[in-house]
Amino acid sequence: MNPKKYDVLILGSGEAGKFIAWDLAKQGQRVAVIEQKYIGGSCPNIACLPSKNIIQSAKVASYFWRSEEFGITKDNCKIHMLGVRDRKRKMVDDLVNLHLDFFRQSGAELIIGSGRFIGSKMIEVAFPDGNAQVFTGDKIIVSTGSRATIEPIPGLSEANPLTHIDALEFDHIPEHLLILGGGYVGLEFAQAMRRFGSRVTIIERNNRLAHREDIDVSEGLRELCQEEGINVITDFRVNQAEGKSGQWVKLHGTGAGSQITIEGTDLLIASGRTPNTQDIGLDQTGVELDDRGYIKVNERLETTAPDIWAVGDCAGSPNFTHIAFDDFRIVRDNIAGGHRVTTGRQVPFCMFTDPELARVGLSETEAKAQGVPYRLTKVPMKAVLRTRTLSETRGFMKALIDTKSDRILGFSAFGVGAGEIMATVQVAIIGGLPYTALRDAIFTHPTLPEGLIPLFSAVPPISKIGD
């Protein structure tokens, strides 16, 4: 056995892994990335970008259904799911080719095969043709990501449920799609498939949708589902499944203290993530896992084994591509002798329902749980005049302001363009600007960020001592 040696060996080509590879290779280091299937990781292939592509097609469909509202009549409108899928596939193909170009330009080697540790810094790769080879690295980066969780409910695995990967490949409109989970993935797919013409039922174990968010956010999402004809069942625990997804599925469970049965034609699982850390030989490395199966890392993303780092989902980082990109920057700088950490970093997010939900900093729920006092300001999206020109007035914006200063503690928006509006507030938070800087700014009229002026103009004054 003559292993091929590298300065840096990376298992998984996801967001953090690929950028580490490209950056270090450009510096002249010998770098290789081992990828089992999805070049570039989940984001360009089976997650972020493909799902937003499908969601955009559904958005266009919604405009057809609303066309008379805009003074336009429609005739013979029909959804062709093969066309929707092909548009998504073309985008993915283009992105994969772009990634291959980046590998070539950087000098990083891309190894296609299934990797497994056979020693502390040795990975054996099984190639698609049945051959195998061993590779070693002075430094190792684990970037294996995560997958959809399928819980050990009797009959559930046997029902062959869909995950988000399968749902992106629909070549037909499901008659009645059951979605197990009322979080990001479940809500995004529910709205998209409903707009394509499916009957959709969301089944959520908790007492409200997006249950970790503020109550007004959950209520806004429920109202959105109701108006779009999406059935929502909360406080429901599935205890048995039968049938086959794509034909006929029946879920038995408990809701509101009663036994309930829900039937549909297709079943999508969207109820959590499981790290891809099993069966890759980590027990051969000294890398420890926590009780949920995530790789234990410190604030520098170092594992319990020397010269081995873990990044992205498998390391328990928040499951966002932009966080994985920050993981790359942390590891890159630390390998170069710096000291960059995950402690205290911002974690913005956007859920791409229509309208979007975006948040950065503290929510009211988090502030109350942490005992952080705040001043609340909140305005409806219809206060933003641009929304009236778009006929997209649903939702609200709100912000939390410190009670003793003008510091912005958090911002949430449920409305059209929420992600872009949030970015403006996020930059202000990063720069340490008081909310008054946004209140007194001159934003172009009519644009969506202009709504920050009425929002921050409504901040309650700082209470005087004794009030």
Image: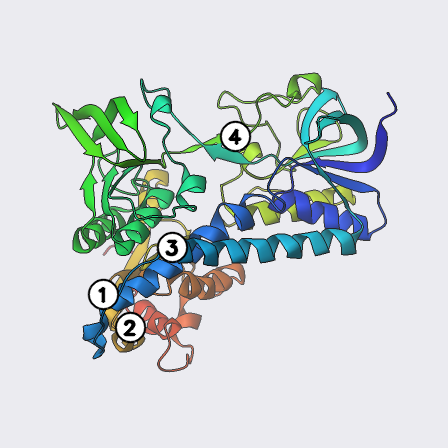
Work out which quarter of the rendered image holds the N terminus and state it: top right
Callout 4 crowding tier (Cα within 10 Å): few <14, some 14–19, many ≥20: many
Q: Is residue 6 left or right of residue 346?
A: right
Per the image, the residue denoted by label 1 is 65
Q: Is residue 330 left or right of residue 210?
A: right
Judging depth in this view, the residue of 209 and 431 nearest the camera is: 209
Secondary element under disc 3, as helix, strand or loop, is loop
Cα distance in 3D space between marks 4 and 2: 40 Å
- The amino acid type, in three-letter code, at marker 4 is Pro
Judging depth in this view, the residue of 29 and 423 nearest the camera is: 29
Per the image, the residue denoted by label 4 is 275
Cα distance in 3D space between marks 1 and 4: 40 Å
Q: Quadrant of residue 105?
A: bottom right
Residue 387 is marked as 2
Judging depth in this view, the residue of 238 and 216 nearest the camera is: 238
* Residue at figure coordinates x 26%, y 51% from the top left: 194
Q: Quadrant of residue 352?
A: bottom left
Cα distance in 3D space between marks 3 and 1: 20 Å
Per the image, the residue denoted by label 3 is 352
* Residue at figure coordinates x 66%, y 22% from the top left: 287
Cα distance in 3D space between marks 1 and 2: 19 Å
In this view, the mark in front (4 or 2)? 4
Give percent across and percent down for residue 233.
Answer: 19, 37
